[in-house]
Amino acid sequence: MVFATWAARIPAVRDHLQLDAATLALVLLCGGIGAVGSFPLAAWITGHYGARHSTLYSGLALLVSLPLLGLAPGLWSLMVVCTCYGAASSCFDVAINALGAQAERDAGRPIMSMLHGWFCVGTFSGALVASGVAGLGVAPVWHFLLLSALFVWPLYAAYQAMPDDRPEHDPERQLFVLPHGHLVVLGVIAFCGAIVEGSVADWSGIYMKDHIGASDGATPLAYAAFAGMMLVMRMIGDGLKARYDARRVVSVGTLVASGGIALAVASNSMAPAILGFAIAGIGVAAVFPFVFSAAGRHGSTALAAVATLGYSGSLIGPPLFGFLAHGWGLQAALALLGVLCLAMAASSRRAQWLQ
């Protein structure tokens, strides 16, 4: 919900601060720097305190940073807050995926896609709510404050419900390593996936408003369609993985995603553009749960290493999209995402460890 709320209201924040595409790209770059730069911290917190405590601490930081994005009075303050938001997001992401990997091991069957599906429940509903709130003319800061206030108690209740997983102190344990060996292959696939997901989240609304000419209330619908189809596919992804294998699902899916991106690029009206983003969501849905599941089997340290390389795509993707959009246009920037989907399809076919 937090992620989708910020993504859906980026056009409103941009207009309020009168930012152009290149300047907005710098703001999003700060979020990526915060995310990637904090992965050693995320690995340390999770390894030292356990994923349960890390989820609470980083989740609270995330809920505090969201309203500050709406309160930022100018470019520089927005860049600082966006850096903090990115850091909190990455720490939270590592923690919940570590919890998910452990739950999958305990279950003895694939469940990671279903767990990532619940992330899509939040992004889909968050985007729809944001569409309605934006259509009513509510300022982003009040939207952000209300959402953060509503989610403090559910976060704490979830923390209380989970068993304590604080690890025994081991001075010899490595809490963070750079990805190596087969983890690099998984990281590269996640890297491309993060570029596609992050760019669609941050720029689909801008694309709908500036290229398609959608209203403020309609601009979040492209991301809602993308997230909604990701939700549907992630809820059935574990069954597909059991019937086929992760490599085949990711390879075919990313080929489908490239077709969806092509449709969005070729569109000049709202309906086909939204359909294109929806198809792209179907195609990339399996990337993160299957890559993180494979990495999580090697422990939280390996998971953080793959996440570091993967979420470097969050650092590079949205700002690169912005710079390309500024120099070559929104359609050219969106077309690059289709090329990356083809690259993921080729890489996943060779990833022997993606199972």
Image (spheres, rainbow, N blue to C red):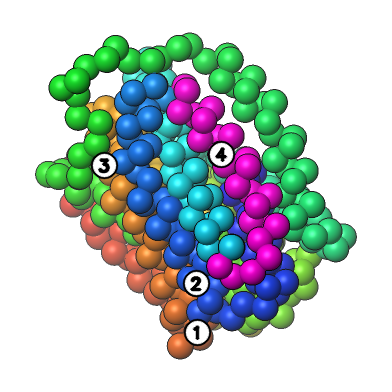
Query: Which tag, 2 or 3, sits closer to the chain's start?
Result: 2
**Disc 1 or 3, which lies upstream in sequence?**
3
Q: Along the line of sight, which residue is nearer the eye, 72 or 189?
A: 72
The residue under label 2 is which amino acid type?
Answer: Ala
Q: Nearer the viewer, residue 330 or 72?
A: 72
Say left or right for 77 vs 165: right
Q: Dot 1 lies on which element?
A: helix
Query: Badge 3 is on which residue?
Result: 305
How far from the left and from the top, in percent, is residue 79?
A: 53, 63
Q: Nearer the viewer, mark 4 or mark 3?
A: 4
Q: Could you say which disc has been placed on residue 61 in the image?
A: 4
- Mark 1–mark 3 distance (CA, rounded to whole Å): 33 Å
Which is more N-terminal, label 1 or label 4? 4
Alpha-carbon neighbours of circle 2 within 10 Å: few (<14), some, or many (≥20)?
many
Identify the mark nearer the N-term, 1 or 2.
2
Q: CA distance from mark 4 to mark 3?
A: 22 Å
Residue 25 image label:
2
Q: Which residues are magenta?
A: 52-76
Quarter of the figure that contains the N terminus = top right
Name which residue type carries label 4: Ala
Q: Which mark is residue 326?
A: 1
Magenta: main secondary structure equals helix
Q: Position of residue 124 (x, y in %)?
A: 64, 48
Asked which secondary structure carries label 4, the reply is helix
Q: Are marks 1 and 2 in contact (CB under 8 Å)?
A: yes
Residue 331 showing in the rendered view: no
**Looking at this view, is 149 or 260 the one in front?**
149
